[in-house]
Amino acid sequence: MTETASRPTLEAVAARAGVSRATVSRVVNGGDGVREPLVERVRRAVEELGYVPNQAARSLVTKRHDAVAVVIAEPETRVFADPFFALQLRGISKELTSHDNQLVLLLTEGRDDHARVARYLAGGHVDGALVFSLHLDDPLPGLIQGAGVPTVFGGRPGWSDGTRDVVYVDSDNRGGARAAVRLLAGLGRTRIAHITGPLDQTSAADRLDGYREVMGVHDPRLVVESDFTPGGAERAMRELLDRRPDLDAVFAANDLAASGALRVLRERGRRVPEDVAVVGFDDMLPVAEQSDPPLTTVRQDIEEMGRIMARLLLRRLDRSVADEGPGGVVLPTTLVRRASA
Amino acid sequence: MTETASRPTLEAVAARAGVSRATVSRVVNGGDGVREPLVERVRRAVEELGYVPNQAARSLVTKRHDAVAVVIAEPETRVFADPFFALQLRGISKELTSHDNQLVLLLTEGRDDHARVARYLAGGHVDGALVFSLHLDDPLPGLIQGAGVPTVFGGRPGWSDGTRDVVYVDSDNRGGARAAVRLLAGLGRTRIAHITGPLDQTSAADRLDGYREVMGVHDPRLVVESDFTPGGAERAMRELLDRRPDLDAVFAANDLAASGALRVLRERGRRVPEDVAVVGFDDMLPVAEQSDPPLTTVRQDIEEMGRIMARLLLRRLDRSVADEGPGGVVLPTTLVRRASA
DNA sequence: CGCGGGCCGGAGAGCGCTCTCACCCGGGAC
DNA sequence: GTCCCGGGTGAGAGCGCTCTCCGGCCCGCG
């Protein structure tokens, strides 16, 4: 018996179970329409031989890959400084895994990679794509749409021509910002400053919008554009204090920025929250809980966001027809009260 | 001309170029042994039709997938709190991309997933695997070895039965720790404490070993086991101060822990570095640079580590025979002087 | 008791590619 | 001029699987 070391094929299982390839295939793929005793016999043969279907052969005929690409455009190193993508990935991974799909990770580093990614997606190696592209001017989403692969975006894509037939999942950035500013206003604060994120990202722009909606007409000196980093926020905070030394609250566009603001406030001798109340955004635990004082912030469930993106995509892939069409899913945020406001 | 929407095949290209499938195949795969004019004609046909090879069909015959799995065992949420894996992934991704390999990400969540991962790898869907498993008792590495897939480990696997035929890439944790402690000793500090990481991880254990090698015989009260988190380090630091109020230096097993220690030292009125000098490990920039005072620390190039892992694996996959056998690659660390020591 | 229908299982044709092998043709040696 | 050699090219056989038919068997009904 010259068993080769190579993996057993359907044929081998069929021979061992004394049935045809077709029957084994049926059993392996759910076993519908095969009588119980045969199912049992095939199952045992599969077990004994340690048979694992050859995905390549299967894909060749089904044109399905049970694989989804996750594209993370990473123009700046920053995106990796916070665990944002890690959490999304986790959510995505869980959802894909539970539906027996593989996750193919595509990290892009500047324009050169765009063509590569587009070609890969157009090449039909995966059934769909989950795309993170945070910047207004990013050509990647367009390229990907062109590739004709079912796609779900993470975060609202910032296209000037409106959200064309696009499916996306986003946090309720605007609503969260409104809640944050309302809290501060409710505490009697009237000179509420805002340290924004990079405004070419829709999340930052939406948070600013939320701030403005609650503030109504306000001193433009209360708003400084920053970049989601502690360092940037420190500079922004200093500028705010110079412009309006009487400010009594700060809404920072994310927790990292809030931590930078906190540092400057401490350095300038302002007490938090007595003199200046501070609210962040994200509820990034290591930052928000460990900061001094612990941060009041707007929580968004990032892992859940990833999970929902994956679920949405899988659903689109499943039903061959009758898509419920484009549209966005906006996930609610919740305000978490701690000591800073 | 009823062009279907489906993607063009080799056959179609061959027809258009007026050659056989075999010739097109040759051209697509490098074009050796095909005369120039024909190469040109085929190239043009490929271009015009937008032909992209079907990877499934190719894999079916070559038994190669040009895909590598990255397995990240994630028993704790902690691993995602720091950008460690993100950086490794980036390095890996760059290296794989430049060799036209895909990255299949497998995140595991507890024991249940182990079998799934093992089955996937054994299923021959990928050519090799890059595995991160940090814990001493983790059965995953064993399972993966059993799957018979070429594998490179990230970090020295902690097996009691010695490092059997295993290829791994690791930082010089022990050497880095030695350098850190020597620096402190060189500053005249004699009561140098150590806040360890979780000692079931080889990196933490190796750092402790390095500390011990330089310290020689020392007060065991100077060492407290912790968990790589700021919170854990705060508790550890308090305990150290209670045990040995006269300590004059702290070597923390990573930067996150150092930042926790710093906070407690400040709270207890110790000046850094005057009263207590502090050294961290990792040189995780947002933490190390932003901390107050900026952290003196041991740098390890995590992205490079990922790149080297990938390179090692690809090299093993390439040469069919004549592996240079098992063994570890240990990457050097460098001491970065800032203000805290 | 005979016939029709339904269900189960098998045969076989590909999916798109690679790779071996055989063939063809031109050029050099005899 | 014939033979041989070798580089280029084409023909064709699969790789391992799915899926459509099709045939056979059994059951129910007339």
Image (tube, coloured by chain):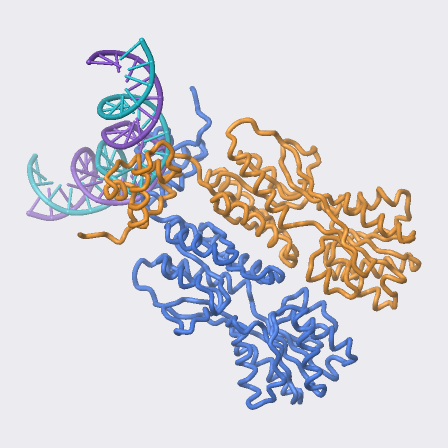
Chain colours: A orange, B blue, C purple, D cyan
Q: Nearer the viewer, residue A145 or A63?
A: A63
- Taking the image as shown, residue A253 lies to the left or right of residue B320, namely right
A216 relative to B181, above or below: above
- Report the side of B129 relative to B93 (left or right): left
Please count the marks in the image.
0
Residue B231 is left or right of residue A242, and the answer is left
Rendered position, B245 above or below A328: below
Q: Residue at x 80, y 55 (%)?
A: A279
Q: Which quadrant is home to the C terminus of chain B? A: bottom right
Please tell me in which quadrant of the rendered image residue D1 appears.
top left
Displayed quadrant of residue B34: top left
**Residue located 60% across and 74% down the image:** B253
Location of residue A29 by image quarter? top left
* Residue A175 showing in the rendered view: yes
Q: Position of residue A180 (x, y in %)?
A: 81, 50
Classify the position of the N terminus of chain B by image quarter.
top left
Q: Closest to the observer: A317 or D13?
A: A317
Q: Nearer the viewer, residue D2 or A5?
A: A5
- Asked if one can make out residue B37 in the rendered structure from this viewpoint, the answer is no
Residue A205 screen position, x and y as percent: 76, 45
Where residue B33 sits: x, y (%)?
29, 44
Name the residue located 74 percent from the left edge and 54 percent from the top edge: A254
Residue B164 in the image, given as x and y percentages of width and height = 37, 70
